[in-house]
Image: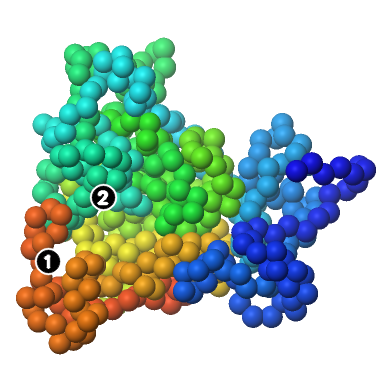
Amino acid sequence: MHVYGCAQNPSFVQASSLYHPDTVERSLKHDGSGTEPGLKDDDGRWDLRPHLGRMQRVNHETLASWHAMLEDDDVPVEHSRMVYTVNRSTAQVLAKLSAAPRIATLGLKFSRGWDESIDRKKGFFDSEWGVPESWDSVILQGPHIHVANPAYKVPNPTMKHNLDWSPVDLEALPVDYVPTTTYKRACDRAIYDSNYGDWGSPEGTDPVRAHYRLAWRAMAANTGERTLIPALLPPRAAHVDGLFAGGDSSGRTVVLATGFASSLILDLALRSAPKAHIRSPQFNRLPFVRAHPLMPQLLNRTLRLNCLTDAYADLWQDVWSPEFGGDDWAGGRPRANRPELACAPTWTTQTPLRLAEDRRQALVEIDALVALMLGVTADELCTVYRTQFPVLYGYDTRRDYFDANGRLVPPEVLRVWRTKDESSSEVERIATNASGNTIAYESPFLLLDREADIRLAYAEFERRLLRRSENAS
């Protein structure tokens, strides 16, 4: 479509994620009352509801905020790419984020890893399923990780396609766990090591694989559960270009960047300007706050989620802070087997959060912390979650049931439970997972309210911030 007109100051109305022209007509006549719509409604259908909040007036000021998020200084403001938001509330959040500092200020170094096609043809690695003898021989792919989880899935021996993977049981994860892979080193060790990448200078080498790194899936799932999917990788591990990684000599810096990247707010900053891939230019433009009184709480939760094995023991000890010892949950459901957040400076098998409910709660608290640090309110964060992340919202409200011990209930157990409710027998609540472990799931089975948990965590962190300020004065 080509649109022509005379030169003038930019001023137009924008609406995104529209699935029927009637929605536009009725939105223009709407009085602005009621909850703003999202991508999908509460029943998981495309949201056709009209609302004045769908219609955003774009002028030079709007373009300047988009420009701050998406462009370099050599691009004129009037040439900025567009940001796509479903409602005005989300647009207001993005305007706040456009004024924040950028992750680029950290000066991270980046690596794309092995090129899955070119470097395999060169003979650096080849296809072969199995468990490597050590992290030195690990070559990771995108499905290996999920948000703040470096041990999410492993490939099946059949290796039929990119979905032929199975989830990892974090409860049974060995202390010296090394993930199953589908790629194996195919050349001399020295050649393999020297060709992977180096962050050094002419004065000295600094191999990429010598560092703990923040990695994320390079393919952008713009309409999926999450778009930005990051996790921490241990030293010695390699990966193909289905992942992209960044690192620094400071472990604390990498953990902080991972914490921010694991939040819904930074995910929003990416998915509001859809792209096919996420690499260093897109990542560097994400909002970030270098210093904040609540940083220890963010570090603690990020480490507890990512440091799953003793491969992370050095990082844990290096980043651990005495403030971790006084930390506690900012909400969530109390359970008899719920772990304490206060933890010791030495990594042990009790350090990682293993149960699905505890990991979910830690991510909720990371969302609240990052939002608070970036000046996004609890109401705005909840609107972002409800309207911009329909797949995640659908999982929370219809799919993901947790048992009395904080485990995520598998579909085969839920099917029987939905039929019989509390009358289902203990035998019918037993299932064997993909790792071969048999688990008895204890009722009651519950859906958890992420929005309520976000608000509770946000309020608690606000109280801690106020208390710290009062103590300082």
Is residue 388 placed above or below 5 in the rendered structure? below
**Residue 131, position in %: x, y?**
13, 36
> Circle 2 is placed at which residue position?
152
In the foreground, 436 or 231: 436
| Location of residue 123 by image quarter | top left
User: Relative to residue 405, is residue 300 drawn left or right?
Assistant: right
Residue 431 tag number? 1
User: How many callouts does the rendering have?
Assistant: 2
Q: Residue at x 28, y 40 (%)?
A: 161
Q: In which quarter of the image is the N terminus?
A: top right
Q: Which amino acid does label 2 sit on?
A: Tyr
Residue contact between numbered discs 1 and 2, judged by CB atoms under 8 Å: no
- The mark that comes first in sequence, 1 or 2, is 2
In the foreground, 130 or 379: 130
| Location of residue 84 by image quarter | bottom right
Is residue 385 placed above or below 157 in the rendered structure? below
**Residue 125, position in %: x, y?**
24, 22
**Residue 431, position in %: x, y?**
12, 66
In the foreground, 343 or 135: 135
Q: Which residue is drawn at 13% across and 35% down?
A: 130
Q: Which element is circle 2 on?
A: loop
Q: From this viewpoint, is residue 370 visible?
A: no
